[in-house]
Amino acid sequence: MKKSISLGVLLIMMVSLMFFASCAKKAPETDEYPMDIRTGEMTAAEAEAERERQRRIAEEEVEAYRARQAQELQTEAAKTQFLDSKVYFAFDDSSLSAEAREILLAQARWLKANSDRTVIVEGHCDNRGTEEYNLALGSRRAQSVKDFLVNAGVEPSRIVTISYGEERPAVRENNEAAWAKNRRAEFRLR
């Protein structure tokens, strides 16, 4: 009986071995493998397809790089325009003109688009009046700019005001044209 069981087990093992050997995986005949399985080299069509794929990837990378560069230039130009903008005031006044409001609307748009930035609004005056009076007037000018920006949707915590009074004139002359350039609010980024 033991002999028939071992002969049966041996027979089952042989049949199983033949079954598994006949079910061995064949290499798929698809384009997944860029090489000829027999020679280990790419066929001409496969090599051309691979070159085309690499060319498309390179073109996409160049296009993405150009798009990033254009975006960076545009961003830098907008930042420069933001910093170069000035708001001018009438003599002994801190109210905003229509032109000043237009400038400040653009400033508010830039600040909302760049929510990680904090701005310093500097209030300036011409050299007429006392030093104390001009410091107070410069402060009112900076505050009126801040109030406008806050009303336009910029968070108050992102706006710092400072007054320089007559300490930092844009033009060092004593005439109406120079005084008009000195009555201003300027912007710096923190």
Image (cartoon, rainbow, N blue to C red):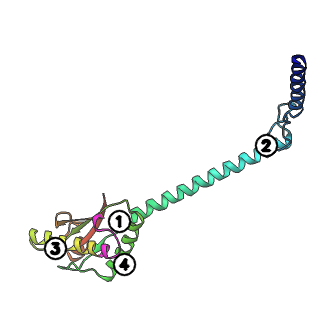
Q: Nearer the viewer, residue 26 or 159?
A: 26
Could you tell me how far apart the alpha carbons at marks 3 and 4 are, in whole angstroms? 22 Å
Q: CA distance from mark 3 to mark 1?
A: 22 Å
Labelled disc at residue 84: 1
**In the image, 145: left or right of 15?**
left
Mark 2, residue position: 32
Q: Is residue 169 visible?
A: yes
| Residue ranking furthest to the front | 1
Task: State left or right for residue 138 relative to residue 38.
Answer: left
Mark 2 neighbour density, 10 Å: few (under 14) some (14–19) many (20 or more): few
- In x, y percent, where is residue 110? 40, 67
User: Badge 1 local density, few (<14 within 10 Å), some, or many (20+)?
Assistant: few
Q: Amino acid at mark 4?
A: Glu
Q: Quadrant of the C terminus?
A: bottom left
**Depth-wise, is mark 4 or mark 1 nearer the camera?**
4
Q: Is residue 58 magenta?
A: no
| In magenta stretch: residue 154 | yes
Residue at 90% across / 24% down in the picture? 11
Distance from label 3 to label 2 (Cα)? 75 Å
Q: Nearer the viewer, residue 177 or 18?
A: 18
Residue corresponding to mark 4:
102
Q: Which residues are magenta?
A: 148-157
Residue 7 position in % (x across, y down): 90, 20
